[in-house]
Amino acid sequence: MSRHAKNSSSSGRLFTRRRLIKSAGAAAAAASVGAVALSRAQAAQEAVPADAIIIGAGYAGATVARELAERGLKPVVLEARDRVGGRVWTNTWAGEEIEIGGSWLGPQQELAHAELSRYNIGTFQDVAAERVVMPGNNGLVTVSPADAAATVDPLWESFYEGSAQYFERPHEPLYRSDLLADVDPLSLQDRLDQLSLSPTELEILNGETSIYSGGPSTIGSLTGMAQWIQLAGGTYQDYLTTMSLRPEGGMIAILNAMLDEAQANVRLNTAVTGITEQNGKVTVTCSGGGQFTAPVVVVAVPVNTWKSITFNPGLPTAHARASSEGIGVPHATKVWLQIKGNVPATQGMAREGTPLPMLIPQQQTAEGRLMIGFAGPSLNVNDASAVQDAVRTYLPNATLVRYRAMEWAKQQYTKGGWGLRRPNQLLSLFPAIEEPHGRIVFAGADIARGWHGAFIEGAIESGLRAAGQAAELA
Ligand SMILES: Cc1cc2nc3c(=O)[nH]c(=O)nc-3n(C[C@H](O)[C@H](O)[C@H](O)COP(=O)(O)OP(=O)(O)OC[C@H]3O[C@@H](n4cnc5c(N)ncnc54)[C@H](O)[C@@H]3O)c2cc1C
């Protein structure tokens, strides 16, 4: 990863030959009028030029960097964190490679697969569940995956009924906007309320709708999740395949390959605080006072963090609305668990409000079974005994060897988890949210037209769109 990082103090690396000549001329002119040497603080304020500035080195920003480099442009990428990847973070824990953020790809995600082919990166199938613990009429019951599917699939089918019509072309979500007016205002909870579900059936569905919503099921929109289902192929089983494949080398592998190909100039630890467009150029100010200028800027940071950047001129209506409402969900806590001994590959699902509504089996190691839990707001992940108790709701005799929790929504440079559009956002934000604001272009999975929010596929899609717009403005 550090291969891509350039020392943030060595700004000379940024200069193209043309710009070096220009700035050398400017320096000579300053000397000729008797200018004294700039103080360190003044030097930091000097705007360093680039062909384009990309803010954020997640999948969207990396896609833009690769695409602009392919067009012969030399962008600079400003990344607030000390690593690239953003909501993708491949790491090592318990001696194993783990994903702290995004983990899986689906076979139908064509853009990600085109990148895998481009960089000759293979995939492998993730661990399949051997059994499922899920809501029954008298508490949780343990069943085979086939029996679970026989119960769960028809419920989701009724939940998503009609979505094949209102998302007739799921990659063009507004294609049947005439049908969307009635459904886009609905939250996931509204949809659950429309169905005549028994208490057990409700518990089977609302654990998942609450996890995707990042809190109560009132947060996420029906059209957000329904679009994912239609993009996946139309059934819940199709959707489950989006959590089946893992890239060799981790989820970060494609992104690193993109930045390598772009020979990207990535400045780590460089948080942007302000963006000002004036006289046909854009100036970006960073938290340390450093400035960069370019004919175009691509904002590829999570929508929930837009409010920590001062835009001048201010954001247009759709962007301001997205920023104030948020798209990244307000609670997204992924917990890696290692459970002692030989433990069957157990999938767990439980009702909204429980500490750990979703449990996904991972590999068996010598010390125990790894599992991923998606926690609800009621789990205090700083309390090891609470985490163990939460696991015991599924596996009563489980002993937790260790765990590692990541609370994505609390991170300064995310301020939310994966994205899921809120009710009404599809019709109120699109297509305006995809448009540049003068010389400022926007990218990111949160605002993808297709696989929005919870998929790197959407980040790549929006990066491709933004790169085309930025190239025209550069
Ligand atoms: C827990 C979790 C599980 C997920 N599971 C999956 C999955 O299984 N499969 C899948 O495909 N997707 C998954 N996702 C979603 C996927 O990770 C994201 O959709 C995708 O990575 C977002 O990419 P992005 O480039 O739009 O944004 P980000 O990855 O968030 O990148 C934005 C970058 O901008 C930087 N930044 C923020 N503010 C500033 C600033 N002011 N100045 C400079 N830089 C800044 C950030 O540090 C970050 O690096 C998951 C996400 C989470 C959180």
Image: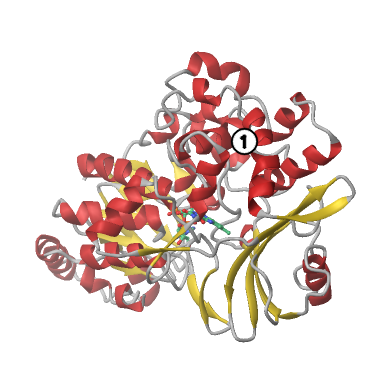
Horizontal side, residue 261 vs residue 315: left or right: left
Residue located 33% across and 62% down the image: 254
Residue 281 horizontal/vertical position (percent): 27, 46
Q: Nearer the viewer, residue 83 or 26?
A: 83
Residue 131 horizontal/vertical position (percent): 68, 60
Q: Is residue 39 visible?
A: yes
Residue located 50% across and 13% down the image: 178
Q: Which residue is mark 1?
A: 422
Q: Badge 1 local density, few (<14 within 10 Å), some, or many (20+)? A: many
Residue 452's place in the image compared with 96, above or below, is: above
Horizontal side, residue 431 vs residue 363: left or right: left
Residue 60's place in the image compared with 100, above or below, is: above
Residue 280 horizontal/vertical position (percent): 26, 41
Q: Quadrant of the N terminus?
A: bottom left
Q: Nearer the viewer, residue 392 or 30?
A: 392
Q: Nearer the viewer, residue 98 or 288?
A: 98
Q: Amino acid at mark 1?
A: Arg
Residue located 62% across and 17% down the image: 182
Q: Nearer the viewer, residue 358 or 32?
A: 358
Please tell me in which quadrant of the rendered image residue 85 appears: bottom left
Q: Quadrant of the C terminus?
A: top left
Q: Is the CB of mark 1 within 8 Å of ligand 1?
A: no
